[in-house]
Structures are given as C-alpha cells and as structure tokens.
Image (tube, rainbow, N blue to C red):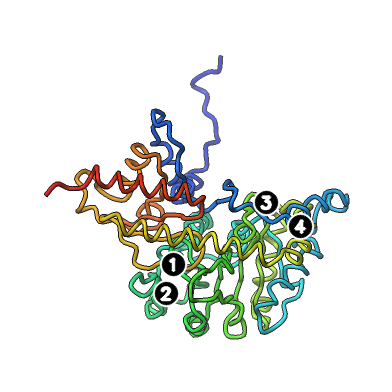
Amino acid sequence: MENSSKQWRFEGNKRLNSASAISVRGVLDVVIGNLSTDDLRPTIPLGNGDPSQFACFRTSTTAEEAIVDAVHSAKYNGYAPTVGVLSARRAIANYLNRDLPYKLSADDIYVTSGCLQAIEVALAAINRPGANILLPRPGFTFYESRAAYEHLQVRHFDLLPARGWEVDVDAIEALADDNTVAIVIINPGNPCGSVSSYDHLKMVAETARKIGILVIADEVYSHLTFGSTPFVPMGIFGSIVPVLSLGSISKRWVVPGWRLGWLVTSDPNGILQKSGIVESITGFLNISTDPATFIQGAIPQILENTKDDFFSKVIATLKEAADKCFDGIREVPCLTCPKKPEGSMFVMVKLNVSLLEDISDDLDFCMKLAKEESVIIVPAGMAFGMKNWLRVTFACEISALEDGLRRIKAFHQRHVRKQ
C-alpha cells in the first residue's frame, strides 16, 4: 500500500484542460453526454462536419485505389522527409497552381497531418513574446484553443451577418497594434457557410498589407461552393501581402480520417523567407509528427486523377441538403437564418429564446434537444462566442436531415411560450 503522505512532484498540465474546453469537440462532448438512453431512435448528428459515415458522401474510387497502389508499391513504408514526400509536394503545388496567377513550387509546400496540424504549425511559426493575432468571430475554435496553448494573444473582429458574414474590415485597423502579427480568414466559412468574393478578399489583403501583418488563409473547404459566389484562393493576393494558405483533402474528398493536409507559403515576393517564418515552419516540423507516408505517396494519383463528376456529385448533394436545411429552419419560429449557406457544410442560426417557455440560452436549447429528441447541434455561444446562436451542419443523408428538422420543429412546439 502506497504511503498516503508521500508528496509527488508531478501533476496534470492545466493549460491543456483550459485549451480543450473551448474546442468544438469539447463542446460536442458536453451536448452528447446529455443524450437519453431511453430514446431508441437513431441520433441525428447535425453537429460536426464529418459526412464520411453517410453512403452519399463516399470518397472517390480513384482515391481508394491510390491508397491501395501506394501500399502495394512498397515505396512508402519508411519515414518521410520533414517537409513531406517530394512527389506529394509537387502534386499539391500543381493542384493549387490551377487557381493562381503565379506558380508555386514544391519548396512552397509543407505536408501536414491534416489541416489541424497546419494550424498548429502556422501559429507556432508566427508566435513571439507579446504577439497577438486577429481571429474572426464566429470562427473555427481550434484557433482559439491552439492560441491559448501557445500563449498567443487573441483579438476578435466580427463577421457581419447582415452583410452575408463579411469581415468587418473597418474594425481590423482599430484592433491591430505593433504586436499584431497575423489575421485569420476562413473561406469558405466555418461556421457560417459563407463564401467571400474576390473584391472583399482583396480589400482584406490590402488592409493586412497596410498594417504590416500576414494572412493565414484557412481554405480546408476550398471549392465546396454551391451558390452564386465562386471560391477565390487568398493566395491570388500573395503579391500584395504574404499568405500562409492551409488546406487538405479531408473535406473535398470526404476523408477527414486520412489526415493529409498542407501549409503553403503563398508569397512570390519572398517576405516569409526573409522574416524567418519559413525557417520557423521547418523548425516546428522537425519536432513534430508526420502524416502517414503511404497517404503522401497516394496524393499525386488522388489530385491528378479524380474526375470532375465526383466533385459535381458532392456539390449537388451539399446544395440539396443546404436548401432543405435552410427551408426547414424557416419553419421553426424560434430560429432565424440570416443568409442561405453557399459553401462549406454549415449554417449559423439565430435562436430567439424569448419565444420559448423554459429555455435559457443556446446551450440549454442544445442540451434539452439532445435529451428529448436525440438531435446534436452545436451551441455557438459556448463554441464560437456567439450567444444564442447555433451551428447546424447539413452534410448528412437527406433523410436524416429531414428527420432532424422534424424533431427540432416538434421540440419547438413542445417548448413554445404560451400566450
């Protein structure tokens, strides 16, 4: 028996606890924990952006065959270079060059374990004592979590729902000071489902240049657009301002579990090299993990050979689901959607708690919805700093989405405030 008076010198890292508390995963765990075991109906997952479990979102056979070929070749059983397998980096550069006015090379590409590691690399590379970063509100909460872990200060600029979730550009200059190092732009938008126009992104680039900061362009949902605004990569404006472009195959190919992403220095003027950012990127990767080598080996075949009809099918499925989600939300009086989603897999929804009898806020709504209807959605107050807003994903089977919307409507009717 251990002597209870013994004093041990170790304890858990409290920084990890505080950082994970503001993650979407952490918030979803809280909501999922409220599911009732007495409800025998299937749970409707309208919380996270992983539709890979649904047959209508199965990845392309080209991608699957590329993995098999890479494994059977026996060329990718060893460790990969720090910055990634050369053939993968060349293929990613060629893939991204289709949308750019200048040419990236393999030297501009850093292969990462999904887009999450690309975020980790970017924030670590730009960090210095006292530095701060400008993040969108609402935005992807992993930036908050990682910044907290890195002791990187955060300042928020608003995305404006009345203007289709555009960046409040006028507020950016007022937020920035001499310690501001970067601004994060997520396009297509998570959690808003918005798609930024060429002119708007150029305005953001010019503002960042004026301040003297770089742009971190999170483009993990690139080309997943189905409205009137086409996807425009921020790297187009790399000659105006240095851009760290982040992406992956997770969303467009619907394979988030494959964990293959990239960080790209979209910087034809070489400013990131001169400022030491490139050296810091390599330094971080030297002490970090790599994506599986055989996945990297499959990348050239995946990027070069996937047919357009696969992408068209995914877009058509997302558009149909987005339309049904938007129309279904309009039938629930306590919910308002300021703009129909045009990209990614999400939509932000305003909750009017004054119409409900016993719901105090967005978290209470989501907790009780999970318990009573087995429907999971994300409370945006807790997850994104937008009190009494909800994030709903429409990337699921149409039948499941329709069932979820019916349950949300029934939940509203049961809790509506009596006149």
User: Which disc number belongs to residue 296?
Assistant: 4
Q: Could you tell me if residue 184 is visible in this image?
A: no
Label for residue 167? Answer: 2
Which disc number belongs to residue 58?
A: none
Q: Secondary structure at mark 2?
A: strand
Mark 2 neighbour density, 10 Å: few (under 14) some (14–19) many (20 or more): many
* Mark nearer the N terminus (3 vs 4): 3
Residue appearing at x 48%, y 52% in the figure? 398
Of mark 4 and mark 2, the one earlier in the sequence is 2
Q: Which mark is residue 258?
A: 3
Q: Is residue 393 visible?
A: yes
Q: Earlier in the sequence, mark 2 or mark 1?
A: 1
Q: Would residue 277 appear left or right of 296 to someone viewing this image?
A: left
Dot 4: within a 10 Å radius of its alpha carbon, few (fewer than 14), some, or many (20 or more) residues? many
Lateral position of residue 235 relative to residue 338, left or right: right
Q: Is residue 328 above or below residue 343?
A: above
- The CA distance from mark 2 to mark 3 is 32 Å
When asked about the image quadrant of residue 97, the answer is bottom right
Circle 1 residue: 136
Disc 1, SS:
strand
Residue shown at 64% from the left, 71% from the top: 277
Q: Name the residue type under label 2.
A: Val
53 or 247: nearer the viewer: 53
Q: Nearer the viewer, residue 87 or 413?
A: 413
How far apart in space, not on screen, are marks 1 and 4 (Cα)? 31 Å
Q: Within the image, what quadrant is residue 307 found in?
A: bottom right
Q: Going 71% across and 71% down the picture, which residue do you hit?
A: 95
CB of mark 4 within 8 Å of CB of mark 2? no
> What amino acid does circle 1 point to?
Pro
Q: Amino acid at mark 4?
A: Gln
Proximity of marks 2 and 1: CB atoms separated by less than 8 Å: yes
Q: Dividing the image into 4 quarters, which one contains the N terminus?
A: top right
